[in-house]
Image (tube, rainbow, N blue to C red):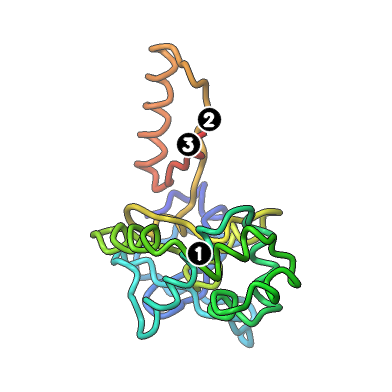
Amino acid sequence: TLPAQYSAHILVFRVFDEVSYAMIMNGKRPVRERDVLKHPDENFKPTRNLPALTGKPLAIAKGAVTKQRDWLVILNAPSLGGASLIRAIEPLGGVSAVAAASARDLTRHGFSEQAAAAITRPDEARIESDLHWLSQPNHHLLCWDDDAYPALLRRINSPPAALFIEGDPGCLWQPQIAIIGSRNPTAGGLDHARDFATTLAHQGMTITSGLA
């Protein structure tokens, strides 16, 4: 049961597949399990479906392994930042088209000669090493063109083109808060950070760290 004093702050969205999402702007009572939530505009339709937060590993669809390899080829190329890579993919026709492009086409679309060479002649040993890592349980590669890529992360000025994940990708769609502190904290500081993180986690928040 959601306490009444927080009922106007909870984020929920419209129902997509297995998961309920809605946005309550003005709650008149606590929200309870199995409550039916409706968008105030009955004609509202979502622009696209969002992934269900089931905690299950991301499904590997037919052809996804090839696409995953194409992403790894590009991600292993030097001198490619997340935002510049994302901008370059669409004009070439997608990530598979980038991986199959000639060095001349790549350089014409802004890739450096070094990056173009790495894409046209990829380091197969490194690709195989990455694929081996991804084959392990709870290891995932979440790319810019995946539906499960976090929507809020898309909005920042320079989003990463891909995320290597160890654990549950569904956590990226949970409400998050970052705890930032000193690289050399005192014992008291560590205790405070641990208490904050524990309390917030018990309230359903995902604790995020940039691992600086």
Q: Residue at x 27, y 64 (%)?
A: 135
Quadrant where the N terminus lies?
bottom left
Question: Between 29 and 161, which is closer to the camera in this rendering?
Answer: 161
Looking at marks 2 and 1 on the same chain, the residue that comes earlier in the sequence is marked by 1
Q: Amino acid at mark 3?
A: Leu
Q: Amino acid at mark 2?
A: Ile
Q: Residue at x 46, y 16 (%)?
A: 185
Q: Amino acid at mark 1?
A: Val
Q: Position of residue 189 (x, y in %)?
A: 44, 17
User: Residue 64's image quarter?
Assistant: bottom left
The residue identified by callout 3 is 211
The residue identified by callout 2 is 180
Cα separation, mark 2 vs mark 1, equals 27 Å
The residue identified by callout 1 is 12
Query: Comparing marks 2 and 1, which lies closer to the viewer?
Result: 2
Cα separation, mark 3 vs mark 1, equals 29 Å
Q: Residue at x 47, y 42 (%)?
A: 208
Looking at marks 3 and 2 on the same chain, the residue that comes earlier in the sequence is marked by 2
Query: Quick one: label 1, few (<14), some, or many (20+) residues within 10 Å?
Result: some
- Asked if marks 2 and 1 touch (Cβ < 8 Å), the reply is no
Judged left or right of residue 182, residue 93 is right
Query: Quick one: label 3, few (<14), some, or many (20+) residues within 10 Å?
Result: few
Query: Quick one: SS at disc 3?
Result: loop
